[in-house]
Structure formats: structure tokens, C-alpha cells
Image (cartoon, rainbow, N blue to C red):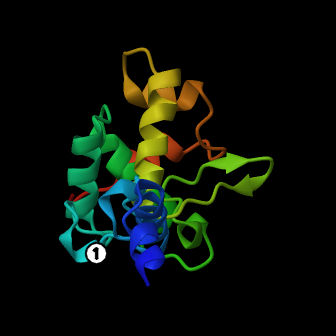
Amino acid sequence: MKKLTDIRNTFSFKILLLIVFLHLNPMCIFSGSNKHTDPSTEYPPFTLTVENLKIALENAGVQHADIVLRQAILETGWFKCTKCSLSRNNIFGFWYKKKYIEFDNWKDCVAYYKRWQDRHYSGGDYYVFLKKVGYATDPSYVKRLKSIKGI
């Protein structure tokens, strides 16, 4: 019985227990991931609404957030479309190799938009920029964005 007690008291055994604990406990702060957090405690809340998207765009530092908000509304039909990129949490309709990019959640899509914007936008009229980079294939895209009211 003494040997078992000696093993339990060794440093390597304690490290092994810590590793097992960290592996089995996804809520542990050492995991480096927030994917297991309770969505109801996040700010902005996890539910995609106009207000929550406004907050997320502001928090991410997205430029021209009012226009970008209109883009999300247009791309998703006020967050109600069933046969669009929204099913992939892609609220801005981003494509890659002729397929919608898929995100774990809509907030990841906001972060992606911010990175895309930082790479491509260097200032000036944002509507002109969207047209110049060919953001949408619809020639009336900018006109449609400008027509969105009530946000």
C-alpha cells in the first residue's frame, strides 16, 4: 500500500492527472477555446438580429458599419432566407471556388469581413469601393443597398 501512496505523490503523476483533467474538461480556461461557452452570456448575444449585428460590427472595428449592415440584410433577406449563404452562417455572401464559405457562427463571418475589408479597402466612398471590387454581380447592388431603410 505504501508504494501506491508514493506514486500518487510523485510530480509526474500529478502532471498526468492535470493533463487528463484538462483533456476531459472542455470548459477549462486553459483549453484556449471559447466554443464551449454559454451563448446566452456572450456580448453581443449569439442571436443574429439587426441590433446584435450593429454591436458586433462596432466591436470588430468594421468601417462603414451602416453600409455593411445593409449588405448583411440584403444578402440574407433580413436574416430570413432559407436558400442562401445564411445556412452556412455566411451573412455577407462570401464565395470561394464557386461555393459559399462556411462559418461556425455569424460572428466568425463578421471577423472574416473585417479581415477582408482591411486587406482591400483603403478609404474613400464605400459604395464606389464595393462596385470597384466587384463585391456583387448584380449591377443594381449599390442601389439596392441604399434603398434599405429602417435600420
Q: Is residue 92 left or right of residue 102?
A: left
Q: Quadrant of the C terminus?
A: bottom left
Q: Is residue 134 left or right of residue 39?
A: right
Secondary structure beneath dot 1 equals loop
In the displayed structure, 109 sits above or below 17; it is above
When asked about the image quadrant of residue 38, the answer is bottom left
Residue drawn 29% across the image and 46% down it: 57
When asked about the image quadrant of residue 10, the answer is bottom left
In the displayed structure, 132 sits above or below 6; it is above
Expressed as whole percent of the image width and height from the top left, the position of residue 45 reads 23, 68
When asked about the image quadrant of residue 135, the answer is top right
**How many numbered tags mark residues here?**
1
Expressed as whole percent of the image width and height from the top left, the position of residue 12 reads 47, 56
In the displayed structure, 109 sits above or below 142; it is below
Expressed as whole percent of the image width and height from the top left, the position of residue 82 reads 56, 80
Return the residue nearer the eye: 43 or 113: 43
Residue 96 is at least partly visible in this image: yes
Q: Which residue is mark 1?
A: 38
Return the residue nearer the eye: 104 or 133: 104
Amino acid type indicated by mark 1:
Asp
Residue 78 is at least partly visible in this image: no
Residue drawn 33% across the image and 42% down it: 67
Expressed as whole percent of the image width and height from the top left, the position of residue 25 reads 40, 73
Return the residue nearer the eye: 45 or 84: 45
Q: Residue furthest right?
A: 97
Residue drawn 68% across the image and 49% down it: 95
Disc 1 packing (10 Å; few <14; some 14–19; many ≥20)? few
Q: Residue furthest bottom?
A: 1
